[in-house]
Amino acid sequence: MKFKMKKCAVLVALAASAALPSMSTQAAGTITFGEDKSLSIGLGIRTAFTSVEDAAPNGNSRSKDFDVDDARIYINASFNKYIKGTFNTFTTTNSADGQDSIRTLDAYLQFEFMDEFNIWMGQLLPPTDRANLDGPFYLNAWSYPGVVSRYQNKFVGRDIGVTLWGKLLDKHLVYSFGAYEGNRASSFNGNSALNPNRSDNLMYSGRVQYDFWDAGNDPAYYTSSTYYGKDVLSIALVGMYQKDAVGQVGASDDYLAYNIDALLEKKFTAGVLNVEGAAYKYDFSKTAVNSDAAGAKSGKAYLGLVSWLFPDVVGWGKFQPYARYQKFSADSGTLFNPDVKEYDLGLNYIIDGHNARISTVYTKTKTEGISDIDKFTVGLQLQF
């Protein structure tokens, strides 16, 4: 590894000194205009400096890039006690011309009758693994675990459909399931005559989660991967299915994916221990590797993460070192479906939970058939 720890420390110090004076976080601003009628607006930003070994234009120097990884506008509205709506945007960069564009991330109606039964409909997160329901802002690591979390989706983990969800047993049991567009033959690029799902089958997804200790920690059926000091023991089972959704016409296969994920967080006098784990199975075989319109790859995947939040406040916040491991083992390893391993060693500086933090992380990615990738990142996350 060419990167020197001394350089890492300098970059961390510069990032912290530049960012800290301007930091202030608050909940989204809310305007009320009648009984149970309101409109709230918020903002989320993740920006980072990334350096990758041998990725500079000359092919043998480290790349040095500043990027806005994620920028979102959150809008929530309440029509009355039971009818609500959510509209969130996502800013992306066109790789062809480098220009930014704003896209719809979430757009759904919410019929919220009681804790035990609710209906959401529109473009939203289907019930999947904890990582996807966290989103990038509520992970316990800087980067999304894309090596293992590979559930099919329309855009940034979202799909269009309807979700039924609720919380039972004094909010300890959280269920969510629904039907969604999934892979549609007409939506793929290229020769649509070769695309699967000619019968327009829907995708079905469901999640059942039980919280043994503290319960009701997250809104709706969403999740977080750390709570910075709660006693949490949570286990969930997830399944997703769509008929004839992968491969090609004449060699199509049903999409079947499932996983178990678990989270343990325990507060001690000396700090907060957080342990997260997940195991996945993407169970299909006729995926025509290089021409599968859905981009689906069959195999098994595993994730493990451990972190420790120190209790002492240093300056503006607390330090939280972490280590994460990801592995994807392809059912039939090829150039188009290789085995992948990824290791992260990181240090979070927690200023205000998920609303304000600075993260530094070294990442090594090992992909079968290609050279290893060494990457260093300094990231800043803010939510208002």
Image (tube, helix red, strand yellow):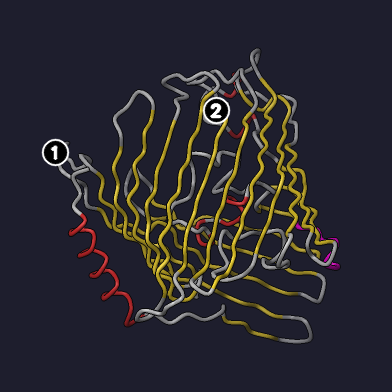
Q: Are discs 1 and 2 less than 8 Å apart at CB?
A: no
Residue 81, by quadrant, is bottom right
Q: Which residue range is magenta in the image?
A: 113-120
Q: Position of residue 29 (x, y in %)?
A: 57, 81
Could you give the CA–CA distance between mark 1 and mark 2, rounded to whole angstroms? 33 Å
Residue 263 in magenta? no
Query: Which residue has dot 1 on it?
Result: 58
Across and down, in percent, residue 104 comes to 56, 56
Residue positioned 59% across, 44% down in the render? 278
Residue at 32% over, 55% down: 377
The percent position of residue 57, horizontal first and vertical second, equals 17, 40
Query: Tag on residue 35?
Result: none
The stretch drawn in magenta includes residue 119:
yes
Mark 2 secondary-structure assignment: loop
Position of 276 with respect to 45 (left or right) is right
Identify the residue under disc 2.
297
At label 1, the amino acid type is Asn
Determine whether 10 is above or below 39 in the image. above
Quadrant of res 195 = top right
* Residue nearest the viewer, comparing 329 with 79: 329
Q: Looking at the image, which residue sits at the far front?
A: 269
93 vs 111, left or right, is left
For badge 2, the amino acid type reads Lys
Closest to the camera, between mark 1 and mark 2, is 2
